[in-house]
Structures are given as structure tokens and as C-alpha cells.
Image (cartoon, rainbow, N blue to C red):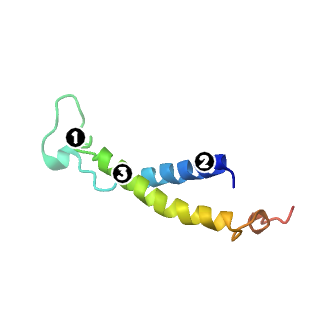
């Protein structure tokens, strides 16, 4: 695994984790009862973006490190991933 592959793997895991984390715990302005003028009642009142970015990074590191170790130490090879046996 090259450095570039490790960075790309980290970025992919990070963005997927972020997309999973974004809707968790969001309360709309309509649920809170404080709708700001000019916004729909379905707009989030407090999306907690900073907290979600922090936890997304923590979860990504927890998933990425063992996966990189598994790939680097030969647990998974390209032959294992070749499902059509072309290699």
C-alpha cells in the first residue's frame, strides 16, 4: 500500500462516515419551536457540525488503522479481491 492509497482510503472512509453521521440527532426548527424568519421549519436548529466532524474523524481512525495494518501485513492481497479470477 502506498502513501497515496492510504490517504485515499482514509478520505473514502471519512466521507462515508460523515454522510452516515450528519442526520444523527438533528432537530428541526419546527420541532424546537423557534423558526427563524426566511427559513423553512424543516431546517436544522443546531446541526452540531463540529462535534460530528470530531467523532467522524475518531471513528475513521478506528476503522482505517486496522484496515491498513491488514493490507500492509498481507492479510488481504489483490488475488483475494479478484472475484472473477482474472489475475
Which residue sits at x=64%, y=49%?
A: 3
Residue 41 disc label: 1
Residue 8 disc label: 2
Report, in whole angstroms, how far the alpha carbon at label 3 lies from the one at label 1: 27 Å
Q: Is residue 59 left or right of residue 36?
A: right
Labels 3 & 1 near each other (Cβ < 8 A) = no
Farthest left residue in view: 33
Q: Is residue 52 left or right of residue 72?
A: left
Q: Nearer the viewer, mark 3 or mark 1?
A: 3
Q: Earlier in the sequence, mark 3 or mark 2?
A: 2
Report, in whole angstroms, how far the alpha carbon at label 1 lies from the one at label 2: 38 Å
* Percent x, y of residue 29: 20, 43
Q: Earlier in the sequence, mark 1 or mark 2?
A: 2
Q: Secondary structure at mark 1?
A: loop
Looking at the rendering, in which quadrant would you find the C terminus?
Answer: bottom right
Q: Is residue 44 left or right of residue 59?
A: left
Labels 3 & 2 near each other (Cβ < 8 A) = no
Which residue sits at x=69%, y=71%?
A: 75
Task: Place residue 70 in its image quadrant.
Answer: bottom right
Q: Which residue is mark 3?
A: 54
Looking at the rendering, in which quadrant would you find the N terminus?
Answer: bottom right
Q: Nearer the viewer, mark 1 or mark 2?
A: 2
Which residue sits at x=61%, y=52%?
A: 6
Q: Nearer the viewer, residue 39 or 9?
A: 9
Report, in whole angstroms, how far the alpha carbon at label 3 lies from the one at label 2: 19 Å
Q: Nearer the viewer, residue 42 or 14?
A: 14
Q: Residues within 10 Å of mark 2 (few under 14, many from 20)?
A: few
Amino acid at each position: 500500500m502506498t502513501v497515496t492509497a492510504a490517504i485515499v482510503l482514509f478520505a473514502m472512509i471519512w466521507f462515508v462516515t460523515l454522510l452516515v453521521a450528519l442526520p444523527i440527532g438533528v432537530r428541526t426548527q419546527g420541532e424546537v419551536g423557534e423558526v427563524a424568519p426566511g427559513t423553512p421549519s424543516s431546517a436544522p436548529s443546531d446541526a452540531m457540525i463540529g462535534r460530528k466532524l470530531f467523532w467522524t474523524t475518531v471513528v475513521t481512525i478506528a476503522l482505517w488503522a486496522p484496515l491498513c495494518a491488514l493490507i500492509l501485513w498481507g492479510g488481504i492481497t489483490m488475488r483475494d479481491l479478484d472475484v472473477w479470477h482474472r489475475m
